[in-house]
């Protein structure tokens, strides 16, 4: 027998696609105890106080610490049959009469009974508080994972009564359309995606009724709005504004539109998926090494989880009842705004959105959309979206999100600020454009603005420091470096130190350069190690240069410039170990020379500019001469250098000093 549940049983038992508050487990069946509890809970689910579309009762599965105890003990065939007969008959005591969906299931070889009690269209319902004859009838509702008596609190009973005959718009009948407007292929795709046994139902009418996307009306079946929203080709044909619009604005003062993208003419959940993929493709991923850690820090311009939660909530909680405005997404250089219409339900105020107070249990605007999105793993438990957006932004290192609405509650807006480093990337793109048109004054102004907006950004600080140095103002670069350090950047500022040291070396101010090199923090990237090694070499501190090259590890062997510079450092250190030196060590000298020779032989075989190859050949000849290698090998190296740069006097002189070949 095929399952008639709209959700996969295994997912149900593990709270996947449905909140735990909408599931109640019963370890066994006993009509005197379990039976009374089941009737009260069915009544509560039918009243659907929070518009979550009721819930499920699973009989035959025990619960421990809020989770199902698996494998389940199950029910005997006799207990299964008895429970179904008793529940069907006893539901007549619910007023108005309400019948849930009873689905016998089998898992791990044992029998279970799953009761699906969707939200009723004839609420509110009452049920006896016990099985005793003449027991008082009361209104039962679900608050969290508990079935409670609404009569005990006047405000809860008042709110429930106000829901009388008020069916959420997405669960109402769509009399203006036909069931033929529902695409059966899309229904079956959905059921396949969520793993529902309903996919095996061959009769289309039965399938639609069991999924509750259609119902009988005057001798024929009519679709419900949810059926058209999720399973028609173009929901906007019946619901104006049932689409998502994305608009990307430029960073110029005029705010010109760069691109517009519309997601329409497809079911709302497909719109969500396609829009998310589009936004994630626009998002930039950054990776940066953090000192003292073995792993790099990863962040994106907008974290995927925050995007998903904000967009799904906008589609879930917006109105489709005569609301002509689409869900809108505005992309600015420094932020993203996701706007839905109208604003939040009454009862939700700004402190709830700011995290200063817990969200109140107000009814959801749409109960079926949220249910389907959860089953598709696009949405999770209700009330968790805003905290998840806030947490995702914090974990990404992004500024806090903002949630707001106007006094008339005409809209609800989620603002996601871009990650600071993403803003830096956009600033550097602006600078590149300004340089291309020769606007040097605007270049400096834009870089200063970017540093002011994000003083912890290393990339912007480096670019501004380069600009200062290019203008001959090293002191401004030094001040910038001091300011950057105080901003407590995540990135390692070593590149700033070596940049300033290099500028001083260009002016032959070695002592000033050394002052900055002595302040170098611990290096944790290959590029930082390369830069530090090269500047130390220029400052004549070859031992320190050698250590930095070694710190770069095997990466040196793949970088032709670094490899050549490293070889030259070894040549300098070999000179210090010459036997003529008081503390010279011939064995160490020979080791440095052999290592330099191997590196230079690799350099001349690597792809490199002509000048680099020429000087590498020249250095190789010098090393081979110090190693007392055959004269023809030394001459060959000098000849290779001279052939590459014929006018270089040092190459000519080296060849002239060689004894004539015999």
Image (spheres, rainbow, N blue to C red):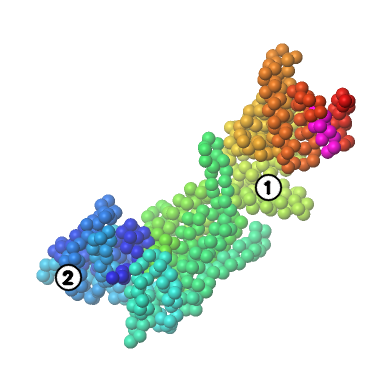
Q: Are marks 2 and 1 in contact (CB under 8 Å)?
A: no
Name the chief secondary structure element in magenta: helix
Q: Which residue is mark 2?
A: 86
Q: CA distance from mark 2 to mark 1?
A: 76 Å
Residue 250, quarter of picture: bottom right
Is residue 386 or residue 98 the one in the foreground?
A: 98
* Quadrant containing the C terminus in the rendered view: top right
Q: Is residue 235 above or below residue 596?
A: below
Q: Quadrant of the N terminus?
A: bottom left
With respect to residue 265, does 377 lie above or below? above
The reply to whether the magenta stretch includes residue 327 is no
Residue 225's x, y, as percent? 41, 76
In the image, is 255 to the left or to the right of 64?
right
- Could you tell which of marks 2 and 1 lies nearer the N-terminus? 2
Instruction: Point out which mark residue 447 bears.
Output: 1
Q: Residue at x 62, y 31 (%)?
A: 550
Q: Position of residue 86 (x, y in %)?
A: 17, 70
Crowd around label 2: few <14 · some 14–19 · many ≥20 (10 Å): few
567 sits to left or right of 207: right
Q: Residue at x 29, y 54 (%)?
A: 67
In the figure, 4 relative to 379: above or below?
Answer: below
Q: Position of residue 100 (x, y in %)?
A: 26, 71
| Magenta residues, start to end | 634-644
Q: Secondary structure at mark 1?
A: helix
How packed mark 1 is, by other alpha carbons closer than 10 Å (few <14, some 14-19, many 20 or more), is many
Residue 639 is covered by the magenta coloring: yes
């Amino acid at each position: 027998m095929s399952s008639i549940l709209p959700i996969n049983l295994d997912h149900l038992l593990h709270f996947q696609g449905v909140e735990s508050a909408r599931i109640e487990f019963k370890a066994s069946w006993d009509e005197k105890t379990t039976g009374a509890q089941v009737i009260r809970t069915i009544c509560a689910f039918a009243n659907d106080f929070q518009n979550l579309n009721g819930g499920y009762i699973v009989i035959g599965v025990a619960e421990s610490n809020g989770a199902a105890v698996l494998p389940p003990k199950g029910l005997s065939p006799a207990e299964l049959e008895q429970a179904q007969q008793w529940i069907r008959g006893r539901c007549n005591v619910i007023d108005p009469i309400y019948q849930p969906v009873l689905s016998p299931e089998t898992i791990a070889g044992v029998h279970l009974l799953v009761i699906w009690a969707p939200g009723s269209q004839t609420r509110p319902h009452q049920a006896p508080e016990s099985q005793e004859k003449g027991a008082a009838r009361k209104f039962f509702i679900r608050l969290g994972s508990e079935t409670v008596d609404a009569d005990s609190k006047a405000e809860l009973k008042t709110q429930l009564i106000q829901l009388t005959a008020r069916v959420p718009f997405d669960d109402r009948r769509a009399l203006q359309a036909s069931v033929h407007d529902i695409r059966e292929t899309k229904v079956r795709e959905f059921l396949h995606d969520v793993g529902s046994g309903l996919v095996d139902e061959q009769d289309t009418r039965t399938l639609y009724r069991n999924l509750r996307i259609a119902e009988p009306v005057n001798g024929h079946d009519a679709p419900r709005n949810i059926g058209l929203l999720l399973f028609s080709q173009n929901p906007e044909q019946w619901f104006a504004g049932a689409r998502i619009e994305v608009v990307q604005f430029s960073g110029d003062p005029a705010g010109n539109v760069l691109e517009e993208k519309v997601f329409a003419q497809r079911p709302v959940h497909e719109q969500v998926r396609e829009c998310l993929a589009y936004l994630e493709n626009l998002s930039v991923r950054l990776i940066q090494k953090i000192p003292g850690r073995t792993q790099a820090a990863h962040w994106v311009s907008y974290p995927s989880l925050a995007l998903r939660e904000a967009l799904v909530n906008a589609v879930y909680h917006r109105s489709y009842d005569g609301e002509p405005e689409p869900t809108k997404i505005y992309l600015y250089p420094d932020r993203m705004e996701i706007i839905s219409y109208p604003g939040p339900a009454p009862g939700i105020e700004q402190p709830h959105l700011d995290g200063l107070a817990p969200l109140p249990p107000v009814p959801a605007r749409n109960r079926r959309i949220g249910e389907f999105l959860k089953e598709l793993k696009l949405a999770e438990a209700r009330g968790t979206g805003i905290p998840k957006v806030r947490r995702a932004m914090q974990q990404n290192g992004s500024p806090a999100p903002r949630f707001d609405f106007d006094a008339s509650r005409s809209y609800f807006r989620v603002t996601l600020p871009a990650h600071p480093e993403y803003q830096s990337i956009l600033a550097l793109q602006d600078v590149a454009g300004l340089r291309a048109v020769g606007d040097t004054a605007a270049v400096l102004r834009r870089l200063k603005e970017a540093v002011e907006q994000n003083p912890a950004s290393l990339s912007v600080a480096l670019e501004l420091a380069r600009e200062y140095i290019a203008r001959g103002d090293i002191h401004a670069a030094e001040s910038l470096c001091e300011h950057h350090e105080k901003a407590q950047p995540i990135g390692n500022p070593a590149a700033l130190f070596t940049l300033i040291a290099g500028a001083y070396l260009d002016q032959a101010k070695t002592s000033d350069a050394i002052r900055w090199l002595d302040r170098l923090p611990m290096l944790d990237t290959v590029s930082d190690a390369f830069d530090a090694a090269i500047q130390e070499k220029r400052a004549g501190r070859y031992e320190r240069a050698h250590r930095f090259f070694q710190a770069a590890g095997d990466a040196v062997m793949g970088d032709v410039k670094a490899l050549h510079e490293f070889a030259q450092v070894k040549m300098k250190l070999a000179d210090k170990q010459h036997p003529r030196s008081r503390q010279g060590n011939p064995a160490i000298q020979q080791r440095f020379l052999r290592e330099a020779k191997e590196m230079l032989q690799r350099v001349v075989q690597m792809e490199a500019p002509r000048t680099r190859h020429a000087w590498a050949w020249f250095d190789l000849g010098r090393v081979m001469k110090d190693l007392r290698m055959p004269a023809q090998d030394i001459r060959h190296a000098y000849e290779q250098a001279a052939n590459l740069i014929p006018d270089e006097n040092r190459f000519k002189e080296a060849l002239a000093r060689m004894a004539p070949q015999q």
